[in-house]
Image: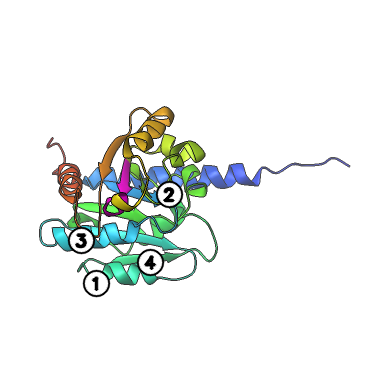
Amino acid sequence: MTVRRIEVRERVMERNDALARDVRARLTGIGVPAFNLVSSPGSGKTLLLERTLQDLNGEMRIAIITGDVQTQNDADRIAQWTDNLVQAVVTGGACHLDARQVTQALEALELSTLDLLFIENVGNLVCPASWDLGETAKIVLFSVTEGEDKPVKYPKMFQQARYVVINKTDLLPHLSFDVDLAKAYAREVNPDLEFFETSALTGSGMEAWYDFLRAQARRPIGVT
């Protein structure tokens, strides 16, 4: 009997990448940048988004697609700070979002009214690295409680990312975390990374983050 091998994963990834290209083309066509925010669990993604929405309320129109394994708790937290619809994607155990879920979430958003879109991915530094969601860029967030060598332990994620947010800097006086060493590890993996140092709790470093978002926010097509 002849054995027929079916490469299921490759087909799934091909389908995902095709959908991601459609998402990217759609968002690029209307000039809305989208950032895929990735991290380990507990690094502070949700609080960073809450603080961002709170401080930029009235200045920028930001929508959020937030992914979680079992609950929509993060989406409920974020929704308190914005009048825009917060799309909750409950993956039912999957360790990452995919482009199909993002495509479905976009259908409920008034994209033409937005300046910026965040996709808050499931807390995981392995699976999301391999899945294109049609984002403008991946932003890796890791906290000072996690250890400086995070980038070399999870190199693919940092290779795929364009920006790094080192968060919870308010805890630095109580830890032995070396920010310069963490950046050096990250640059070993990806020398083109750009960095932000923030405390979403105290607000330290957030203005540089906001300036970045302002510079990235939607502009009329053809305007640079």
Of circles 1 and 2, which is in front? Answer: 2
Pointer 4 residue: 88
Give the colour scheme of this rendering: rainbow
* Residue 181 pos. (x, y %): 37, 34
**In the image, residue 42 lies in the stretch drawn in magenta:** no
Q: Quadrant of the N terminus?
A: top right
Residue 136 visible in the current orientation: no
Spatial CA span between label 4 and label 1: 14 Å
Residue nearest the viewer, comparing 87 with 142: 142
Q: Which residue is mark 3?
A: 53
Q: Of the two numbered discs 2 and 4 on the same chain, state the one appearing first in sequence.
A: 4
> Marks 1 and 2, how far apart in space?
28 Å
- What range is drawn magenta here? 164-172
Q: Amino acid at mark 2?
A: Glu
Residue 52, quarter of picture:
bottom left
Q: Earlier in the sequence, mark 2 or mark 3?
A: 3
Q: Mark 1 or mark 2, which has the lower sequence index?
A: 1
Question: Can residue 223 be seen at all in this image of the molecule?
Answer: yes
Q: Where residue 146 is drawn, which disc sits there?
A: 2
Q: Residues within 10 Å of mark 4 (few under 14, many from 20)?
A: many
Label 3, label 4: how far apart the Cα atoms are: 16 Å
Q: Is tag 3's residue or tag 1's residue first in the polypeptide sequence?
A: 3
Q: Residues within 10 Å of mark 1 (few under 14, many from 20)?
A: few
Q: Identify the mark at residue 80; answer none if there is no mark.
A: 1
Q: Residue at x 41, y 46 (%)?
A: 20
- Do the residues under discs 2 and 4 have CB atoms within 8 angstroms? no
